[in-house]
Amino acid sequence: MDERRDFSHFVRGPVDGLLTLDLILVNGDCAACFNDIEAKALAIPGVEQARVNITHGRMTVVWRQDASSASVIMDQLARSGYPAQPFQPQKAEAAEAARASHLLKCLAVASFAAMNIMLLSVSVWSGGEMDITSETRDFFHGLSALIALPAAAYAGRPFFTSALTGLRARRMNMDVPISLGIVLALGMSVFETLAHREHAYFDSAMMLLAFLLFGRVLEQFVKQRTRVAAGNIAALKGAMAQRIEPDGSLVLVPVDSLAPGDEVWLLAGERAPADAVVVSGASSLDESVITGETRRREVSAGAAIYAGSLNFEGVLRLRVSKAGAASLIDDVASLVEKAAQARSHYRRLADRAARLYAPLVHTSAALTAVGWLVVGASLHDAMIYAIAVLIITCPCALALAVPAVQVVAAGRLFRAGVFLNTPEALERLSEIDTVVFDKTGTLTQPCAQVVNRLDLSEDLLAAAASLSRSSHHPLAVALAVCTAGEMIADAREVSGAGVKAMVDGQVWRLGSAAFCDIPEWAQPAPLSASVLYIRRGDAHAPVIIDQMLRPDAVAVVARLRAKGFPVAILSGDHAAAVGAVAAQLGVSDWRAGLKPAEKIAAIESMKASGRRVLMVGDGLNDAPALAAAHASMSPVCAVELAQAQADAVFLGERLGPVVEAIATARLAKRLMQQNLALSVIYNAIAAPLAVLGYVTPIIAAAAMSGSSILVTLNALRAGGTPMKAGEAASSQSPEIGAPAAAAQRGLA
Amino acid sequence: MNVLVFMAPLAICLGLIGLLAFVWSLRNGQYDDVKGAAHRILSDDDLPK
């Protein structure tokens, strides 16, 4: 079949006759290869520019419109040993990058201002009362004001806008006391400068801004890296579909560019690219990704099928009914929405602290003013003392307390192969007390394995492995994925029967029992298992292929139990399959055949009995349950909707990252609480001094930077070495190894 | 001490130049591929052969 491919969906331009394509390098984790990759790309006729981004494992190629094409470039790269996948940078990713660079600019401006004002302030302080004339002091204060006011107006915007939105929504967030503190400190300092007085707080205000922005920048970097990693994973999964053109020819197009009404071919072993209706052909579908059910469904013309269904046998002609982002099952989508809404009421630790903290600080400032007035101070002095209270208690350490821990803990989780979707994921993960697993694809491996490997002789297994590489049949593909072997050049596929080849004068066959001339295997197999037959000369055997548990599933469940977490299984699969897995894992609390709404109900009833549930699942049918649970995790091979609902996504073949994530989250929570306690202690010492009027600018500067550094140092303790980081990274199955590696590249 | 009228603003201007240089480098995409920069400095394909 002569294939044409269409990558126009990904190509940008033309600008001056030049086209641009963004690529993700499949094996781009070789940092030293970039020279070679760029040289190979530039050697392709027509290519004008090629630039590898090693940090993200991506590459941008620019070529003359008339001299080359996207498919030629990709073929050439693949032939040079650097296969690449085209991708479209996502809007969300660009937005995160823009936000990061804005915050970085704010940080630069605030640090510049803080350092230069500190230069002037230190001069004033060390000048003391004697050695510095009041003119010089006023001059220095005036200069400080000239730097501080524009700098604060620019660098303070992230806080001011967030405080305003918070107030408009009648919600107290941490940015309200911060903004108020900064504005009052600057205002009072300007007033004092104009009145030729001694104390100005320009340095404190700017230092505060710089510290706080540092926290925000760290937080933003984590978010951005997560986006890049998620983008790489999505793009490497990026499937192609065979679209049937009006003239009957076939074009290979990226799934994203399919539109409703397009017709596509679905060969055996391929996944449906979009929700579609069968136009012609008949086959059986594996819908385990969508429903969790491992039994196959027979379909024929007129049947509706869902994106992600695996075509098991025949060739189907499909008409796309929904494509791209719209491709969801409607009732699942609405269930997800409802469940996610319920969870959005979750209040973050920092916000809860802010709600307690802000009124307390503002009242004590007001009481300070009143108190000083009562004992007979002037209005001016009373105001100064009140504002000093606000400045000294401005939640610098408090605002750093949580993000600093988040950044360090997220970094540790990255190394363990877990990345967080939401900032509050850590807090929610730390609070769970029950773990619920989905079965298919979560407890079991995403791809099937040979179950009776040990019963097969080496020769037979090798023959099966070699033959399987010449077939598109899903069972053969599954066999090829989980075995190692060389493809046999003259192997021939007999449609609907199997593969055969002549090797060293022997007939090798892989396929149905009749095809291999072997009696059917009589022993009962699990319902989800499939049997292939292999014949090598006179030797023959059945090859049983079934879903197997993830290698460390038993150990992980045992460890969770040992730590006191009850474990349950909620699956959409039939009872026999779930029961077998539950027995193997020693889990007594399991339910099978659940629909998405029933999974939610099961989780709601656990919630009602006061338990906080961590849901781990991968299928479309798990998505609502993931959204409803207190916290949720998905493996990297999960469907997009499930991943979007999960708090965290873990890479690799093992379940170990689930335990690591819980442990890290608990450690992080403890450190956050410690940090909050440190901030409270700091305030308990500093605030009374301010109330009594002992705080001068130099004391404010020392106290604030001291507490911020203390909190940051404490946060670093969340780093540590994650357990089994090496194991998680080294044991990826071939199918998901590439995206996982790419993701880790994005994160490293 | 009148010299301070020149010296202090001059010192601040020097700092300002540093700030502008940073903003320029940020706009110029110097931080887009930090790892890449570390490796590229080792490549010698710009030497005359």
Image (cartoon, rainbow, N blue to C red):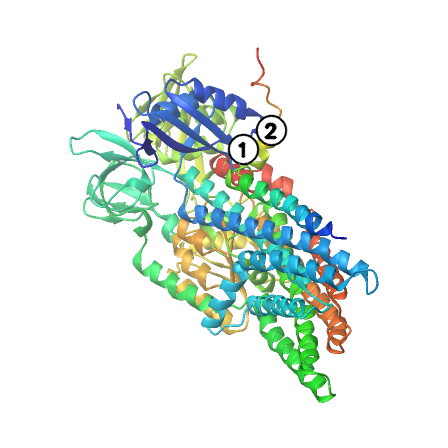
Residue B42 point in image, percent of width and height:
62, 24
Packing grade of label 1 (10 A; few <14, some 14-19, many >=20) is many
Q: Is residue A15 visible?
A: yes
* Callout 1 secondary element: loop
Tags 2 and 1 touching, CB below 8 Å: yes
Q: Which residue is mark 2?
A: B39
Inter-mark Cα distance, 2 to 1: 9 Å
Residue B21 point in image, percent of width and height:
58, 40
User: In terms of depth relative to the viewer, which is nearer, A79 or A192?
Assistant: A192
Residue A149 point in image, percent of width and height:
58, 60
Q: Quarter of the image containing the N terminus of chain A?
A: top left
Q: Is residue A146 left or right of residue A501?
A: right
User: In terms of depth relative to the viewer, which is nearer, A235 or A362?
Assistant: A362
The correct choice, above or below, for A331 with respect to A737 in the image is below
- Total of numbered circles in the picture? 2
Packing grade of label 2 (10 A; few <14, some 14-19, many >=20) is some
Q: Please, what is the three-letter code of the amino acid marked with disc 2?
A: His
- Indicate the chain on which mark 2 is placed: B
Q: Please, what is the three-letter code of the amino acid marked with disc 1?
A: Ile
- Indicate the chain on which mark 1 is placed: A
Question: Which residue corresponds to the image point at 64% horizontal and 39% vertical from the top-left?
Answer: A726
Q: Is residue A704 left or right of residue A658?
A: right
Residue A69 point in image, percent of width and height:
33, 25
Residue found at the very far front of the displayed protein: B2
Q: Is residue A659 visible?
A: no
